[in-house]
Amino acid sequence: MRGAETFFIDLARLIVTWLEKQGMSPLVADIVLLVIQFICIAAIVTVNIIILIWLERKISGFIQQRLGPNRLGPWGIFQTIADAIKLLTKEDIIPSQTDKIIFRTAPIVFIVISLMLYVVIPFGDGMAIVDLNMGVLYFISVGSLGTIALLMAGWGSNNKWSLLGAMRAVAQMISYEIPLAFSLLGVIMIAGSLKMSDIIAAQNNVWFVFLQPVAFITYFIAATAELNRGPFDMPEAEQELTAGAYTEYSGMRWALFFLAEYTNLFAVSAMAAVMFFGGWQGPWLPSWLWLPIKAYIIMLVFFWLKWTLPRIRMDHLMSFSWKVLIPVTLVNLVVTGCVLQFFK
Amino acid sequence: MYQELKERLLKNWDGKIEINEGKDFFEIITQSEILFTLMEFLKKEFGFNYLANLCGVDYGEKFTMVYHVCRIPENLKVCVKADIPRDNPEIDSLTCLWPAADFQEREVYDLMGIVFKGHPDLKRILLPEDFEGHPLRKDYKAV
Amino acid sequence: MIESDFITINVGPQHPSTHGGLHAETVLDGEHIVDVKVHLGYVHRSVEKIAESRTYTQFIPYNSRLDYLATHLPAMGYCQAVEKLLGVTVPERAEYIRVIMAELSRIASHMLFIGSLAIDIGATTGLIYCFRDRERIMDMFEMTSGQRLIASYMRIGGIAEDLPEEFYPAVKSFLDDLPYMLDEYNNLLTGNEILQARLKNTGILPADKAIAYGVSGPNLRASGIAYDIRKAEPYSIYERFDFDVPIGSKGDNWDRFLMRIREIEESAKIIRQALQDLPEGEIRAKVPRIIKPEKGAEVYHRIESSKGELGFYIVSDGSEKPYRLHVRAPSFINLGVLPLISRGGKLQDLIANIATLDPVLGEADR
């Protein structure tokens, strides 16, 4: 049991000691380890996305009384891999009137930003790549950078649908950034730290979802909007904007956006698990299994919402953020502050 | 109701119109010059508020415009017909009386080649703008 | 004050939610609609011209391809128009079967309306549920005519064949399950807060405008005008059935949506009554093999199709082919009101407006 718990940490130590034995200085060994860790993250993310896409298809099939993918492999589990191969071999089409540099870099920027989120996520006990002092702040600020990528995609495509999608994306993501941050502030106030490990440690006795239920709900709603998922999938909105900001993208460039969205989805769900559900804490199983389990359960709710609800209207979306979510989160902050002061 | 309508119509346009009763629709056969005033009269005086249908028929030497006008929800029905000479196929547009005439007149213009005077946007609607000829005319030869 | 430009976008003809080849040239100020222009003709097949070179019988299948979502309704309208022209009386049993088929078509069309509205406003799952249930009607059409979508079952003077034995239990179980299906739609869609917010007070069509623009069918009734040709001018045997004409109050998208759900219930009522009273007997009147109405005869026959007033104006010249055939297509005329109800709304409302007007482009473009 103990071995399973510290398996990855032991592995990392083993690598570092082995590298040092080969005559490397500790600094170089650490850098090599970091590189290995980043590669691992990229691999985890890729495998994770393959599972996620398959899972979403299966779940949407279940909700819609269909079978979902069922041809490739048992339960159609290789469908996503086949799709990935198809997307990789597709012709790379860049429309002639686009702003080439912006058009090409937008998907890369998007995926890089979403990968950067994983740096601070504690996958298990002591298993964050960097346990930053201000991890939550890092997460929020890096997460909001995704707006730029969508704006680049919309503007660079030189297409009116894309531009409309990008306009919506910017308006929506900036508006929902505020309630997202505010709802996390309540948790931070209780934990008294911006460090992920401190926040998890503070949930030893009781999960913050019970202390901060309002904050969790507002976080969840704002996160749905941040992720551009249904019912808030304004920037994409197939039925209105054909594909919004992604209209001109095809093949692997489009797939990068798609991957980035799922990458973000897991990151935001993992963040919810860390902030509200005790992170990697849990009985019996090793800690590095608990966090994915919790994140997957949260993601199931995201899937469920997306495949049930109609898309909200843009102006309702904005007024919901400014007139409902922000006031509610502010009140929540005030109440939390008062209660903390009272029971100190 | 139809009786009163008949009397008023004959009083106003005696000799210019012909009335057929006993059919499914109360039928008025009129001339293209007075069509607009007659239609205006039907709408304003008798409250025929609903232009159900309009279409053109090519009778060789002449075109006939057929209008089916109703008053709803009472369901009073009038059919108005007006002949148009083939060499000068023009008739007043009814768009300002019933906006419903907009699309239908454009369709008749498109397929039959009848020009509606006073129509705000008389363009082809079903066929492409560079299409030649009017297919529903009897002398149209499909290639 | 920031100066901003208008942008013109072409919603369609290749767009996910324009129900076929509809092209709405939209001028936008940000998300606000300044103007909409409807362009049609992308699926124009010149059906009226084709009719002039086909015999009366040969033209029957073309009708099902007009409004392919309610396949029996246009065919029924056409056959009745020709029967009026000939003065043929249709046997009782055929009339009842026609009514059953027509109302099943109406239910199928309205179910598709609900489903396509759901997917147009982003609720993908609603579509699948409605298609699942509509499939049972398609199966019934297949039993009777061998075709699912564009069945040709109506004949001049009656119907093609009598109902097969397996049809009765199928339609009975469908009618029994219908309340549960509607419950499901109501749970998934009607009661949904987001859907209500999107449909209520958008795309308002006042009653006077609706009449002036020639809007008909459920769209007209949503504006509060109780005008249903089945009641106002009963054709076939509709005067024998007891059913209500649901009307809306405001004429917004929400009313137009509710109209469909309530009309499904009313149609089910009619089918139940028709099944109960279904008499035995002939299914086709004696009609000459070659149909030649008298010279100069003409008729304008209209029925209440699922989209509105579907009229057939036929002129005969005494030959076996119609001299002139005009289809008064409700979808075509209903689309004329799209700019009016969309102006001043949002881009997302335009999509909902198109969906609730329920145009079938096969019928609009003919």
Image (spheres, rainbow, N blue to C red):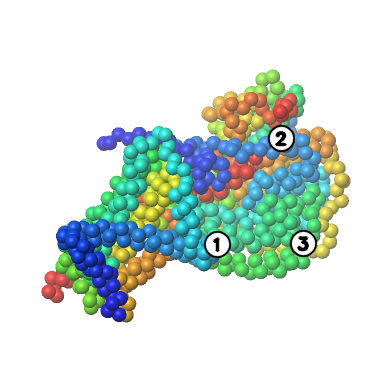
Q: Amino acid at mark 2?
A: Lys
| Disc 1 chain ID | A
Secondary structure at numbered mark 3: loop
Q: Residue at x 18, y 58 (%)?
A: A28
Q: Between marks 2 and 3, how big is the CA–CA gap?
A: 34 Å
* The N terminus of chain A: image quadrant: bottom left
Which residue position is annotated with label 1?
Answer: A71
| Disc 3 chain ID | C
Nearest the viewer among C125 and C241 is C125
Which residue position is annotated with label 3?
Answer: C163
Label 3 or label 1, whichever lies nearer to me, is 1
Q: Between marks 3 and 1, how big is the CA–CA gap?
A: 39 Å
Q: Residue A53: which disc? A: none
Query: x, y (%) of residue C44?
Result: 63, 38
| Mark 3 nearby-residue class (10 Å; few <14, some 14–19, many ≥20) | some
Which residue position is annotated with label 2?
Answer: C49
Secondary structure at numbered mark 2: helix
Up the image or down, B22 lies above or below C131; here it is: above
